Image: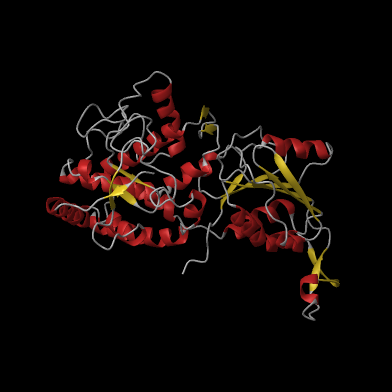
């Protein structure tokens, strides 16, 4: 990305100080998140001040200067355009970019890069277009900020209560935006629209393509930059931001803001315990056998009982290798599942690695092998498809289906018809409404935050 960092003029420095002062008063929670979690540029500007064009943001051929964007670490502001907005509008723009980071929109778009379709909670499927997803994200955030009265919405912002309400999920909003933008509705507009020009509805707003890939502002590879995001740290600081916002509103926080905080901070039972409860309810578990030593302890001269008894039947685990979950995460999650699998003691354990097609199948003879297998065949990172997995299962033995299926994914997949066997989705996002069937357990992405 072609970024030319610039210093602010004395007048712009005063305008920036005024903007941050108003944020401290009217949006203290958002200001807290900015200072604690986004790049702080020598404590002077907080944002990275740089000149860039809409073409730099991915709008082909548009050389006009952009306004603001974020890549999950930096909020980048073009002072030539940004300071043409009013004081309250600048507060709104700042909160908008911060909200993109609270929702991890940069990471979501990065994980969706190989998808071809999006499924809404009512089961409807739409072709996936990243620019339309960006619009959906903008509509959701702007609806929340308007309801929360945080700053003043610029006239060129994307906002329409008929398209998005503050408490809605972005996938459902996507369906309505797709119909508007891609099916002859009010969409389109001028992606380079200048401040204060035109109608908000249907235009790309003040930050077309304002959600950039992780690492875009620093030249860091997207996968590396995304892996540096610490979800637990975000949860801790977001909890503090919620307290500050509640204090500012004297306990009468707007519903959209409360929904955002609840969505990020809803307490979760440890995901392995949650899955274990479901599995034992459906499949049961084995017993201990002192005549069968646990081979993990033999090398330490400890004779510990191994798992015995009938245990469960056939357990199938699907590892989504489409880029939705990183290799290290998949391997760590399987390691964390080892204890519950040992308790279940399945007669057969199969791990299938698949994105758009199956790349490898591991038949696990001993749970200790979970420490050594690795995500396979992830070179191309294709789109996500479940059909090959369900078809593979059906073709093994038509008279013998799994007793349990666990899919480790983010849910951005077209769901085939519900199978006859029980299904658990170990989801890296707490997006339960996105799954048309099965029980959804939100995976804790990172538990070692200090």
Residue 208 appears in the picture as rendered = yes
Q: As rendered, which of 214 and 29 lies closer to the eye?
A: 214
Q: Reply above or below: 158 against 368.
A: above
Q: Indicate the quadrant where residue 28 lies.
A: bottom left
Percent x, y for residue 71? 39, 48
Decide if residue 99 is on the left or right side of residue 12: right
Give the residue furthest to the top: 184
Residue 245 visible in the picture: no
Q: Nearer the viewer, residue 50 or 156?
A: 50
Residue 206: horizontal and vertical position, in percent?
28, 37
Q: Is residue 139 left or right of residue 324?
A: left
Q: Which residue is found at the position 55% from the left and 32% from the top? A: 116
Q: Residue 238 versus residue 276: which sits nearer the camera?
A: 238
Q: In this orientation, which residue lies closer to the viewer: 407 or 106?
A: 106
> Residue 119: x and y, percent?
53, 33
Locate the N terminus and report the quarter of the image it occupies.
top left
Q: How is the image coloured?
A: secondary structure
Instruction: Judge whether 360 appears above or below 58 on screen.
Output: below
Q: Residue furthest right?
A: 291
Determine which quarter of the picture holds residue 65: top left
| Residue 397 lies in quadrant | top right
Q: How many marks?
A: 0
**Where is residue 216 shown, x and y percent of the image?**
41, 47
| Residue drawn at 51 percent across, 57 percent down | 268
Q: Residue at x 43, y 52 (%)?
A: 264
């Amino acid at each position: 990305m072609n970024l030319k960092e610039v210093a602010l003029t004395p007048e712009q420095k005063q305008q920036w100080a005024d903007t941050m002062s108003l944020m401290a008063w009217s949006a203290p929670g958002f200001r807290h998140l900015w200072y604690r979690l986004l790049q702080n540029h020598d404590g002077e500007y907080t944002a990275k001040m740089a000149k860039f064009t809409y073409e730099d943001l991915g709008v082909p051929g548009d050389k006009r200067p952009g306004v603001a964007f974020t890549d999950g670490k930096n909020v980048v502001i073009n002072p030539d355009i940004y300071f043409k907005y009013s004081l309250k509008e600048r507060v709104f723009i700042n909160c908008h970019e911060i909200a993109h980071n609270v929702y991890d929109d940069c990471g979501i778009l990065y994980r969706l890069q190989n998808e071809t379709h999006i499924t809404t909670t009512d089961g409807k499927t739409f072709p996936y277009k990243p620019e339309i997803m960006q619009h959906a994200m903008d509509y959701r955030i702007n609806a929340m900020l308007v309801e929360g009265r945080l700053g003043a919405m610029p006239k060129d912002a994307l906002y329409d209560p008929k398209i998005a309400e503050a408490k809605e999920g972005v996938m459902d909003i996507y369906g309505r935006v797709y119909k508007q933008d891609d099916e002859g509705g009010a969409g389109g507009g001028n992606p380079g629209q200048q401040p204060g020009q035109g109608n908000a509805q249907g235009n790309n707003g003040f930050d077309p393509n304002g959600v950039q890939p992780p690492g875009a502002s620093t030249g860091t590879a997207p996968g590396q930059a995304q892996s540096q995001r610490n979800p637990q740290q975000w949860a801790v600081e977001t909890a503090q931001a919620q307290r500050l916002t509640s204090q500012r509103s004297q306990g009468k926080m707007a519903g959209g803001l409360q929904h955002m905080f609840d969505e990020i901070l809803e307490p979760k039972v440890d995901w392995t315990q949650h899955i274990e409860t479901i599995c034992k309810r459906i499949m049961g578990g084995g017993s201990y056998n002192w005549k069968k030593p646990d081979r993990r302890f033999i090398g330490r001269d400890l004779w510990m009982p191994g798992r015995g008894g009938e245990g469960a039947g056939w357990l199938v685990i699907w590892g989504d290798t489409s880029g939705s979950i990183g290799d290290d995460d998949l391997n760590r999650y399987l390691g964390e599942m080892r204890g519950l699998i040992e308790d279940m003691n399945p007669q057969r354990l199969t791990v299938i690695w698949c994105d758009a097609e199956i790349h490898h199948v591991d038949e696990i003879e001993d749970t200790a092998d979970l420490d050594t297998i690795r995500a396979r065949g992830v070179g191309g990172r294709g789109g996500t498809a479940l059909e090959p997995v369900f078809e593979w299962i059906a073709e093994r033995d038509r008279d013998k289906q799994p007793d349990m299926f666990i899919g480790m994914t983010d849910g951005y997949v077209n769901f085939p018809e519900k199978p006859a066997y029980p299904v658990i989705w170990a989801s890296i996002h707490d997006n339960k409404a996105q799954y048309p069937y099965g029980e959804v357990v939100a995976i804790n992405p990172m538990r070692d935050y200090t």
